[in-house]
Image (spheres, rainbow, N blue to C red):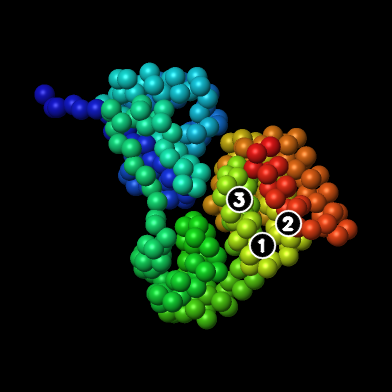
Amino acid sequence: MAETGPAPVTLLWGEDTFLLREAALAALGDLRVTEVDAAEWEGGELQDLATPSLFGEPRALLLTDARSLRKDAVGELATYLAAPDPDATLVICCQVAERGKVPAALDKLVKPVGTVRQVAIPRKELEPWLAKRAGSLGVDIAAPAARALVDTLGEEPGQLVAALEQLADAFPGQRITPQIVGQQFRGLGDQRVWDLCDRAFARDLPGAIRSLGSIEAGGDESIKTLGGIAARLRDLIKVRSLPDRTPPARAAKEAGLRFEWQGRRDQQQARNFTMARLLALHQLVVDADRALKSGATGDVIMPTLIVEIATG
């Protein structure tokens, strides 16, 4: 008789949703997988995982955004993990705030029966990772160009990979230099404002305040920063108005975004707010714009607005 062990259960945690998803897909391999966003948990998903397939295929479930699990869903998960199915695969992805830790409750549930793994790329390894990723896409990128790409677009892996794909299409067979990076992404150096929006709308107040401080130290005008916040907020309102199960690619298209990962990001951020709250925040942005143009100083207006966004 074949030896059976605990079910392949994996909890992946980290700050970046793009890296988490890539790690999850690598763990799942060629399995046919059912994907469930924790915010859309209806109950019974784990029962489906444990039910034998009609055609004898291995069953797999990918659970994303695990921090959004309701109490009843955590209870279902605990019941399943007490005696997980040995022929099924469960991968759980949990995004945490900057410098955050894996939620203790999930860690305690998974460790006895599976693997808990952090997914991250340290800053010092980001450029080598980017160069390696470029090679897999057929992009020949010089080390200074990889550094220029990070300096221009920031440290978000999903955005950097999308940029590599854009370079592959625009400059096939060419060695990518810092000059080409500057030519292709001129005008996209507002990453600090994007980073501020990412942190504020992800409800990461400490990270958002640090990001705002970096922007202010760089001498950027508050009215310009406010414009970036207003643009992200409008995108979130568009995405929030769509049905919950809208595919990220369609969400991106409806919001006028360039990449699917942007649609996925905005969907995740929009779920942190009701539509009423997003509209209320929009009014706060309008009020902040009026105040700045009337002579109020950004060092008072902007921190107050960021606190409102990140804490509600």
Residue labelled with disc 1: 216
Residue at the image point whose x is 85% and y is 54% from the top? 291
Q: Please give left or right for residue 130 compared with residue 203 in the image.
A: left
Name the residue rendered at 50%, 28% in the picture: 69
Q: Secondary structure at mark 1?
A: helix
- According to the picture, the residue beneath numbered tag 3 turns out to be 208
Q: Is residue 146 left or right of residue 181?
A: left
- Say which amino acid is labelled 3: Ala
* Residue in the image at 48% along x and 23% along y: 73
Q: Nearer the viewer, mark 2 or mark 3?
A: 2
Kindly identify which residue carries mark 2: 299
Neighbor class of circle 1 (other Cα within 10 Å; few <14, some 14-19, many 20+) is some
Separation of marks 2 and 1 at Cα, in angstroms: 8 Å
Residue 167 against residue 3 in the figure, above or below? below
Quarter of the view holding residue 269: top right
* Label 2 Cα neighbours within 10 Å, binned few <14 / some 14-19 / many ≥20: few
* Horizontal and vertical percent position of residue 60: 36, 33
Relative vertical location of residue 60 with respect to residue 223 in this rendering, above or below: above
Instruction: Tell which circle, 1 or 3, labels the residue nearer the N-terminal end.
Output: 3
Determine if residue 115 is in view.
yes
Taking the spot 43% from the left edge, 20% from the top edge, the residue there is 76
**Residue 186 spot, x, y in % from top left:** 61, 74
- Identity of the amino acid at label 2? Asp
x then y, percent, for residue 31: 34, 39
Q: CA distance from mark 2 to mark 3?
A: 14 Å
Name the outermost residue toward the right.
294
Q: How many marks?
A: 3
Question: Which mark is first along the chain, 3 or 2?
Answer: 3
Secondary element type, mark 2: helix
Image quarter in which the N terminus is found: top left
